[in-house]
Amino acid sequence: MNFKVLAVWSCFTLLFVWAECQKEKPSKASEKAAMKELKASGSKFPKVPSKKLKQGPPKFLKKSQVKATTVPREGKLTILTRAVAKGQFQKVSNTLVLRAGEALDLRCKGKAVKWRYPPYLDDDDVERRLRIKHFERHSQLTVTNSTAADTGEYSCWSFQCRDSECRDGEDKMGKTFIFFTDPQELFVPTEDYYEVIQLRTNHPTLLPCQVTNPAAKVTLHREFPPEKVLVDGLDISHDVKRGFIIHRPQPSHAGSLFCMANVDGVRQISTKYMLIYVNYPSSVPKPAIRASVASFRVGDNFNVTCTVFGESEIAVDFMWEYPGQQIGRPPYVRERTDLVRRGGQVQQESESILYVDEARAVDDGLYTCTAENLQGGTAVSTRIRLVPASPAPKKAKSG
Ligand SMILES: *[C@@H]1O[C@H](CO)[C@@H](O)[C@H](O)[C@H]1NC(C)=O
Ligand SMILES: *[C@@H]1O[C@H](CO)[C@@H](O)[C@H](O)[C@H]1NC(C)=O
């Protein structure tokens, strides 16, 4: 047992020392050679199946994939360290402040490691200043010639692989927010001169004026009329790692806003944000469908009504699918919107009515109405049957 622990430890140490030696000349070939060397140097090192080596480093995740993965919470034992000098590593804290231009060298413990870093570093024109190298028991992320734009969150987590199944390791995550300070760039530069942001009812909105220096004094301003916006920490608050957050957007917040940063008497303004207020529904519509008939005879007229009760000033779009569509039967649809009182509340009633005149056999089937608002859509259906032509004459009303 003791021997095993010792072997693992020495392997770790060797890897780190070796990684340091490789820093100047990182190349795929040397990495492979070193792996081979490690493998060949005897039973002291845990065996790595050759298949794994061939597979190469695990690919890092795209943004969309990252979202889907559950990220384990930061554990007590951080797996993230930073090389501060040759062979010298430091645990990283929640926040790190570096000067733009400084090199970043992060190490993450684990057999299979995933990294997350500011998306900007994935851009091609960043000229591969970002490098990630995976080793047997750790992974290394380096950023050379750092810039203010590299400011952001860097995190890594290791996942356990048993057989061919990998899952995120519990409590094995390292995370730090790194500021790359630059007196010329108090805000993380963006490509856009202005950015359009939707203020949605009941949705906190972020104005992402990200500063590059945590010591910056940041204020929020309106362009027309020029005035400072009150940041009270309740309706609007500031987060040094994100920007300004409008917690309960109101139509009065709309307009052109910008942030101003002040560091040692140097002032800079951010990109401008065009805030547009959008009446945003709190939920998807819940339509109800009702046909004037359950069955019809050829030549009959009937209609199908789709109704949605919801918040006022929320647009609802209706779409119909009906059997006659396939032969290009022209639909006749009428829509209306009214305010109604329902259960003591004023609600908006939106309705779409599909008319089928002089029904034919082809109109037999499923009628589907989809009601949609900005949150999404819901479909409801009803079936309308053709009554087979029978020789019996129409029932007389008088019975
Ligand atoms: C980093 O900066 C140095 C000096 O300014 C330069 O020689 C080198 O090419 C740069 N490296 C990268 C990867 O941009
Ligand atoms: C739908 O059709 C029924 C009977 O065919 C008719 O009584 C009703 O008025 C129609 N509804 C509308 C909204 O036209």
Image (spheres, rainbow, N blue to C red):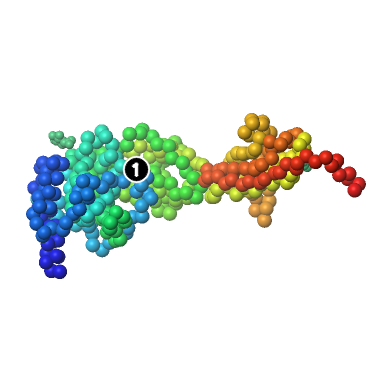
In the depicted view, which residue is nearer to us: 88 or 399?
A: 399
In the depicted view, which residue is nearer to us: 261 or 101?
A: 101
Most distant residue in the right direction: 398
Most distant residue in the bottom direction: 1
Could you tell me residue 244's position as x and y percent?
Answer: 38, 47
Question: If the picture is divided into quarters, which one holds ligand 2?
Answer: top right
Residue corresponding to mark 1: 209
Q: Residue at x 21, y 37 (%)?
A: 128
Most distant residue in the front direction: 391
Q: Is residue 247 left or right of residue 57?
A: right
Give the image quarter of residue 13. bottom left
Give the image quarter of residue 272. top left
Q: Residue at x 61, y 39 (%)?
A: 321
Dot 1, crowdedness within 10 Å: few (<14), some or many (≥20)? many
Could you tell me residue 396's position as x and y percent?
Answer: 89, 44
Q: Is residue 275 left or right of residue 28?
A: right
Q: Is residue 299 left or right of residue 267?
A: right
Could you tell me residue 370's position as x and y percent?
Answer: 59, 43
Asked whether residue 151 appears in the rendered view, the answer is yes
In the depicted view, which residue is nearer to us: 380 or 140?
A: 380
Q: Residue at x 25, y 52 (%)?
A: 113
Q: Residue at x 65, y 48 (%)?
A: 288
Could you tell me residue 212's position as x and y percent?
Answer: 27, 44
In the depicted view, which residue is nearer to us: 251 or 317?
A: 317
Amino acid of disc 1: Cys
Q: Where is 73 relative to 194, above or below?
A: below
Asked whether residue 107 appears in the rendered view, the answer is no
Quadrant housing the N terminus: bottom left
